[in-house]
Each structure stands twice: as C-alpha cells, then as structure tokens.
Image: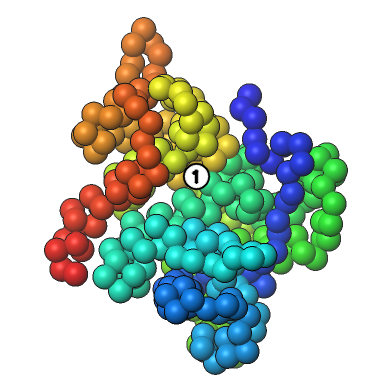
Amino acid sequence: MFNSPLHAIGYTPQFSGHETFPMRYGWLKKAYDAVAVAHRRGALQSVFNEPSAIADFGVGKNMVAAIRHWATQCGVISQGGKGSLSAPTALGNKIFADDGLDPYMEHPSTSWLVHWQLASNSKLTTWFWVFSHFPSSSFDRENIVSALEKLGADRSWSRMANATLKRDVECFVRTYAAKHFLIKQSPEDSMESPLTELSLLKATGKKDGFRLIRGPKNSLGDGVFAYAVSSFWDSYSKSSSTISFEALAHHPGSPGKVFLLTEEDLADRLSRLEAITKSTITWSETAGLKQLVRSRRILADEALAFIDIDYIKNGHEENR
C-alpha cells in the first residue's frame, strides 16, 4: 500500500479558488501575459487585484479570480503572497510567451501537460483524489461528494461544507466532460475547458453518470510523459537511482494514475524513455524486477526540456 499526500498529518484540503468556473481556452495566456508585463515594469500590486483588472481581463470579478487560480495551479505563474507578487514560471515562459511553444494551446501536448500539472497536484483535493484514489471507473457527482465527505471525516478535515464540495465536484466534471449547450447561455458560459479534448472522462447513458477512460493515450506525447516521470520521481524519492514499475503505475499522483494508463501501455512508454533522455533513464527487467534506472538526478529545467520533442516532432517548433 502506497502512502498518499492526502493522508499526511497536517494536510489541508482545497475545494475552492476556481469560483465554480472550469479553466477555459485563452485563460492561461491571459494570466501569463498580464503577469509578465507587470513583472517587467516592476508593479507593486498584483494585476489580479488592480481596480482595472475586470476591464483588463474582459471578465467579471469572480472570473478574474478563477483565471488567477488556474494559472497558479497549472504552474504558469508563481503563487505570490505577502511581500511578493506573482511572476511567470519557467513552464509559463516556455509555453505561453509570444514566442513560446504553444501560447494558444493548439497542440494536444499542452493540454496533457496542463492536465498533469492539475491531477498530480495534491493541493487540488478533488482532482488528485479522483485520478489517484477513486476505486471505480464509473461514478456520478454524488458518489464523489460522498466519498470525499467520508475521507474528510476519517482524516478530521475541517471546513468541508457540503455545498462547497458539490461546487468543486461540478467544476471537476466540467473540466473534463463536455457540457450540454443551453440556448440561454452566454458565449463565455458555453465555452468548454480545453481538457475535454483529452477524452479522459465521458458521460454514460445513466443519468448523471460518468466514466474514467483508461487505456492508450495516442495524443499524449513522449516528451510530456518523460517530463511527468521525472517530476514524479523527484517527488517520490529525489535521491533514489531506481523507481519501481509498481510505483509508476499505482502510486497516488504517478503517471500511470494521472494519465489513466493500463500497465501494458505504461510499460510500453517506459521502454521508450532511454531514447528520449539520451540514456539518462533506462528501463530494466532484471530477475523479474521491473524498474527505471537513472544515471543521475535530472534537474527541473532538463526535465522541462523533454517536452520540446513533442512540438518539434509535429512541426510546431519549425513553424513558429
């Protein structure tokens, strides 16, 4: 049995911040641009708190807060806080700068990267729990709410209002499953999350029923996968030169869990890492023990560079 961050002493669950709005196309770019400009001019106040924020972002106050939330949780901008303002991150610069790899999220690898940032992030309790802990592939919203309430009671989590949980689960579902369009909706409200294109979550014939789709992920690039493996390895055991197949497949927050890969699909991808990492990481099956071996620890900027292969392979880099 693997330990989970959700079971750690002192863990604080998070079921809010998005103001009930799932992430939408263009939001990460908007947040990145605003923070990058403010950072360059040495702003003294967060761009999200400025009186002009509503006009600058072209959305209401709650959506401004949602844009900030998603950009922060996706690792596009830094958190900011007392005495410091948000700033563009290395990942934000790499993807969302005007000369970045994919500033407008037109490439599937960007959506997969964003999904990894969210679903492997234990601070986003619902996201992390559904992908890493939910015991069934099928569910409805109330299943998730009830399960999280039970977990919270078992772990003595405080401030878990049922209404807050329901809103968070609704936001989670709308992040991954397309919502039926209503005639009375505004164009902004009818926009889908870019993560619906990943087909990780599908509505079933059952009322309010959904299903997690486990299996091959043909649009998941080897570069983003290699980045995810390296990031997970550091969080799992930063100093270890080996990591077991079981951990990569079944540990909470692992690539196998977050990308909903079968063991066969995962093993196939792990066997390709040697070429992508130039033999820094190799796949080993010695004496029946399946594991990855690394010759040295891969630094964060090196791991982020792995994703380049996905964009170059598809001609994205050459056309910029």
Residue most extreme to the top: 287
Q: Which residue occupies the foreground of this view, 201 or 50?
A: 50
Q: How many numbered marks are there?
A: 1
Q: Is 311 situated left or right of 266 in this image? A: left
Q: Is residue 140 above or below residue 285?
A: below
Q: In this view, does 180 lie above or below 173?
A: below
Res 70 quadrant in image: bottom right
Res 92 quadrant in image: bottom left
Q: Which colour scheme is used?
A: rainbow
Residue 86: x and y in percent read: 54, 67
* Crowding near the residue tagged with mark 1, few <14, some 14–19, many ≥20 C-alpha atoms within 10 Å: many
Q: Which residue occupies the foreground of this view, 48 or 127?
A: 48
For badge 1, the amino acid type reads Val
Identify the residue position indicated by label 1 in the image.
Answer: 258
Q: Which residue occupies the foreground of this view, 248 or 309?
A: 309
Q: In this view, does 87 lie above or below 287?
A: below
Residue at 29% from the left image edge and 49% from the top image edge: 305
Residue at 44% from the left image edge and 41% from the top image edge: 231
Residue at 31% from the left image edge and 24% from the top image edge: 295
Instruction: Give the position of the N terminus as an image quadrant.
Output: top right
Q: Is 101 situated left or right of 187 in this image? A: left
The reply to whether residue 237 is in sight is yes
Residue 206: x and y in percent read: 62, 58
Residue at 29% from the left image edge and 46% from the top image edge: 306
The reply to whether residue 201 is in sight is no
Secondary structure state at the residue bearing disc 1 = helix
Residue 103: x and y in percent read: 34, 70
Instruction: Give the position of the C terminus as an image quadrant.
Output: bottom left
